[in-house]
Structure formats: structure tokens, C-alpha cells
Amino acid sequence: MRTEHVLRSIWQGDVRPGDGAAARGFARAFQDIVQVRTLPLHIAGTETPVVMAEDSELMPALPLGDVLAEELELEVPYGTLVVLLPETGPCAPGRTGLSRALGMAVAEALLLAVVQGGLPVERQTDALYICAHAAARLTATAALHRRGVDRPAFGLGLAAGLSGFWRGGPLQGDAGALFARPDFLWSSDLAAHLQRLDPAFTCPDPTAIPADLLRVSEGPTGLPLWISRVEGTLRHVLGAPSVPARSTGITSRFNLQ
């Protein structure tokens, strides 16, 4: 399991702070799209990024944030998203590799927002499709261009990150190639595949998706608040009933060692 691999990697010394320029640049680009406090780290022994909430339990009653605070003496505020960046493979440091890693990490964050946000199950495919288009659109902004984001590499990473959720088993015919192209979101084949996968999918018009759909805060905030705000925006766009905002609670943790 992924949690066991992460815990073992931390204990073996295969996880280290992402305090270099590349990791800091990745975190800034990531937070331009996903407005959540982010802690970038490096991990050996994997070729794809891993995105986990700090309260993810690596073992019963042993959250990731506490392990990082104790083992690496890192400050991990509550509500932080931890992004473990690979050091080798197609997502290794470098403009293309980090852009691909960015796409994969954004895909995982969007999945968290949609699945944990409390939207009706029958609207989740629409919601993820809308969020993916909104994220891809942000890579065309001047801010992401200045950060050196390679849009085709980002698109390939986003496709790879979403493919596991959207495959739904073996793909028919040439549909397997859908997630091997950077412009997959604009493919009519993707819309047809999603309609076969989920009869409730309504194929929202990408041109009607608000450009600022993911701009839900003045800056990085805690993950629960971000999920709540994205959910509220999606409910407005999708016409789903609204729900009361959730409390985000305490924001800091301490190393008790």
C-alpha cells in the first residue's frame, strides 16, 4: 500500500526536505493552481509524485504530519498537503519533469476535492471534468509561464493522474491512447468514454467553465477550507444544493520530542 511505502521510506531515510530551488519553484506553481499550504519533499525509489494530506494515517493513529515532525524535524501545520517528488524517471527535476509532476500532483489534489467534498456521487464525474479544465486553463496564465511550466508536459501529467480514476477497467478500441496525449481534455473521444463510464456525465461545455473556478482564496489556505470552498463553487456551477460550511479547527501542530 502507498501509506506503508511512504512510512518505510521515511524510516529508511529515503525522504528528505525539498529545500532546493526546484522544489520551492514546484510548490509555488502548485499553489498557483491548488491554493493549499504545501510541503514539498523528495522521495527515492519511486518515479511518480505522491500527494497526501498531513492527517493521512500511515498506521492507526499515526498521521503523516506527526511522523515528519518527529523523524525530519519539520514544521507541518494542520491542513498541509505533502507532495513527495521523485528524484528519477519522467517526473525528475528539470523543466519538463517537474511540469509533468505538477500535472500529476494537481490531478491528485482535484480528486481529493471532488471525492471528499461531499458532492452527490452522480455529479462527481462532471465536477472532476470541470476542475481539470479549470486547472489546465491556469497553466496558460502569465504567472505559470513565468514559473517555467511546460504546458504539454503538465497535460501529460494531468492525464496520467486522472487516468486511474477515469479508466473504469479496460478501455475500448483506441480509447487507451486517450491518456497519452497532452490535449486529452479537449478530445471528443474522452467525452464519449466518460459517458460510457458514467451515464450521469453531462459533458459540460469547456468554454462555459469559469476561468477563476479554482481561485477560492487570496492565497494558500488549509486543505479542509480549500475543499469546502471548491465544493461550494462546484455546487453553484453544477446547480447542486448547497451545504453549510465546515469548521477547519486547529491549524498548528507541535513536535513533542
Image (cartoon, helix red, strand yellow):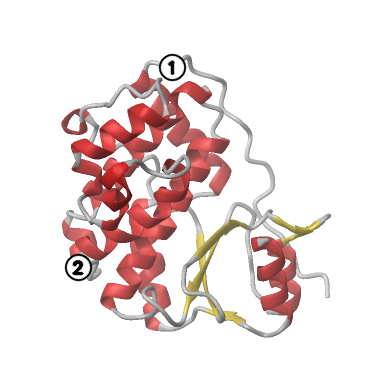
Residue 201 — which label?
none
In the foreground, 17 or 114: 114
Label 2 packing within 10 angstroms: few (<14), some (14-19), many (20+): few
Label 1 packing within 10 angstroms: few (<14), some (14-19), many (20+): some
Q: Quadrant of the N terminus?
A: bottom right
Q: Eyeballing the image, is 142 above or below 209?
A: below
Q: Which residue is mark 1?
A: 240
Residue 213's spot in the image, x, y percent? 31, 36
Q: Choose top left, top right, bottom left or bottom right for residue 69.
A: bottom right
Residue at the image point whose x is 45% and y is 30% from the top = 124
Apparent side of residue 70 relative to residue 121 in the rendered image (left or right): right
Which element carries disc 2, helix, strand or loop?
A: helix
Q: Which residue is mark 2?
A: 146
Q: Eyeballing the image, is 197 above or below 7?
A: above
Residue 207's spot in the image, x, y percent? 16, 32
Residue at the image point whose x is 47% and y is 52% from the top = 108
Residue 106's spot in the image, x, y percent? 40, 54
